[in-house]
Image: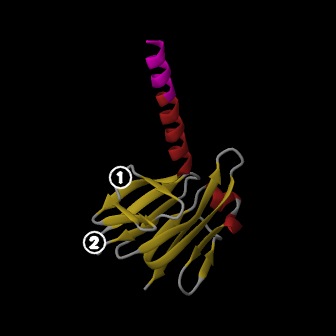
Amino acid sequence: MVMNFKIVATCALVLATAVAHAQEQRTGTLKTVTGEVRLSQGATARAAQEGGGLSQADRIVTGRDASATFMLKDGSVISVGPNSTLELAKVQFDTTTQDGGLMLNLLQGTIRVVTGWLGKLHPEQVKVTTPTSVVGVRGTDFIVEVP
């Protein structure tokens, strides 16, 4: 009986550590998903679902009549329009020090960004790149479109 308890306790500790690590890696949460929205990282792809997590290096691809909105740890809200491809190149935010950085690569389509703490406290650490430009943040609500 004691041996079984040790095994169960060890398994519970391993599971709790894995859950904590997964939450630590999660940089954002999908709030709304409409139509066909895919998330990919490398060769791994999955369907986006409301309430699902996002992490640094995720690529969000929306279909013709699709869109998605997600919130990052710093409170930034990003909406991705139809026919868009967005990469989360750098998403870092320390909730204790409120330091970090955000870099989004918009390859095609449209995004709307309402910045959170990073945009307010460290606007120089928030950038959106497109195939032809780099957008630095000087406001807290902006739209970027790539034809």
Q: Nearer the viewer, residue 78 or 44?
A: 44
Tag of residue 82: none
Q: Dot 2: few (<14), some (14–19), or many (≥20) neighbours within 10 Å?
A: few
Do callouts 1 and 2 mark residues in contact (Cβ within 8 Å)?
A: no
Colour scheme of the rendered structure: secondary structure
How far across and down, in percent of the image, does residue 66 sit? 31, 68
> Marks 1/2: CA distance?
17 Å
Number of numbered discs overlaid on the protein picture: 2
Percent x, y for residue 94?
66, 50
Q: Position of residue 40 (x, y in %)?
A: 41, 65
Check disc 1 and report the residue beneath it.
50
Q: Can you name the residue that lies furthest to the front here?
A: 3
Q: Image point 42% across, 74% down: which residue?
A: 85
Dot 1 crowding, Cα within 10 Å, few <14, some 14–19, many 20+: some
Is the stretch drawn in magenta largely helix, strand or loop? helix
Amino acid under disc 2:
Asp
Residue beneath disc 2: 65
Which residue appears at 48% of the width and 13% of the height? 2
21 vs 93, left or right, is left
Q: Quadrant of residue 127?
A: bottom right
Query: Which residue is found at the position 65% from the left and 71% from the top?
Result: 138
User: What span is colored magenta in the figure?
Assistant: 1-10
Q: Compare marks 1 and 2 and give the one earlier in the sequence.
A: 1
Q: Residue at x 45, y 57 (%)?
A: 70
The one nearer the camera, 85 or 31, is 85
Q: Amino acid at mark 1?
A: Glu
Counting from the top left corner in percent of width and height, residue 5 is at 46, 17
